[in-house]
């Protein structure tokens, strides 16, 4: 299975904000949207960085509450690993596991096309395993 299958099921909506947004505003966005990361983009189509809950913890550990008033560009992850819709889910899982991150922007034709999380990948893998088990049961009983 490919990343495109996951995007088809979950949708391609991406929450983005600009690099000059204050950390406190980005944290509000994370909480309001119920997500774990926001793609940082100056134009909404190219990835300048990503800001996750882990980046927030690092920011507060380094600067304390003063980090909340700083621009998110000061703390975002700038070297963002991405994937493409054609990538296999197994390869994406490997990237996430090796890189120890939970969110992966999806790039299509040079533009931001979605974001998948480790939760999306696990949900997909569970559904895949359940479908295989059901097919085996039907095969055995038929």
Image (tube, rainbow, N blue to C red):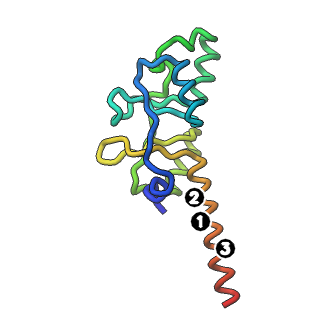
Marks counted in the figure total 3
Which residue does the image show at 55% across and 18% down from the upper left? 24
User: What's the CA distance linking mark 1 and mark 3?
Assistant: 9 Å
Identify residue for label 3.
133
User: What's the CA distance linking mark 1 and mark 2?
Assistant: 6 Å
Out of 95 and 13, give the one closest to the viewer.
13
Residue 134 shows in the view: yes
Q: Earlier in the sequence, mark 2 or mark 3?
A: 2
What is the x, y in percent for residue 68? 56, 14
Q: Farthest residue to the front: give it.
A: 32
Q: Residues within 10 Å of mark 2 (few under 14, many from 20)?
A: some
- Say whether residue 28 is left or right of residue 134: left
Q: Residues within 10 Å of mark 1 (few under 14, many from 20)?
A: few
In the displayed structure, would residue 104 be above or below residue 77?
below
In the displayed structure, would residue 33 be above or below residue 135?
above
- Say whether residue 110 is left or right of residue 58: left
In the displayed structure, would residue 1 be above or below residue 45?
below
Q: Are marks 1 and 3 in contact (CB under 8 Å)?
A: no
Q: Are marks 2 and 3 in contact (CB under 8 Å)?
A: no
Q: Earlier in the sequence, mark 1 or mark 3?
A: 1
Identify residue for label 2.
124
- Determine whether the residue tagged by mark 3 lies in a helix, strand or loop: helix
What is the x, y in percent for residue 107? 37, 45
In the displayed structure, would residue 133 be above or below residue 51?
below
Question: Image quarter for residue 59?
Answer: top right
Which residue does the image show at 32% across and 41% down from the upper left? 111
Q: Are marks 1 and 2 in contact (CB under 8 Å)?
A: yes
Identify residue for label 1.
128
- Determine whether the residue tagged by mark 2 lies in a helix, strand or loop: helix
What is the x, y in percent for residue 105? 44, 41
Q: The C terminus appears in which quarter of the rendering?
A: bottom right
What is the x, y in percent for residue 70? 50, 12
């Amino acid at each position: 299975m490919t990343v495109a299958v996951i995007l088809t099921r979950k949708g391609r909506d991406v929450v983005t904000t600009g690099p000059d947004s204050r950390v406190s505003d980005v944290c509000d966005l994370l909480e309001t949207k119920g997500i774990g990361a926001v793609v940082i983009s100056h134009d909404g189509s190219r990835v300048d960085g990503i800001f996750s809950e882990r980046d927030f913890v690092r920011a507060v550990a380094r600067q304390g509450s003063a980090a909340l008033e700083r621009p998110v560009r000061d703390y975002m992850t700038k070297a963002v690993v991405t994937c493409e819709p054609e990538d296999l889910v197994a390869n994406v899982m490997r990237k996430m596991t090796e890189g120890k991150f939970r969110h992966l922007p999806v790039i299509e034709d040079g533009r931001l096309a979605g974001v998948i999380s480790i939760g999306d990948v696990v949900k997909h893998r569970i559904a895949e395993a359940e479908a295989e088990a059901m097919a085996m049961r039907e095969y055995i009983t038929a």
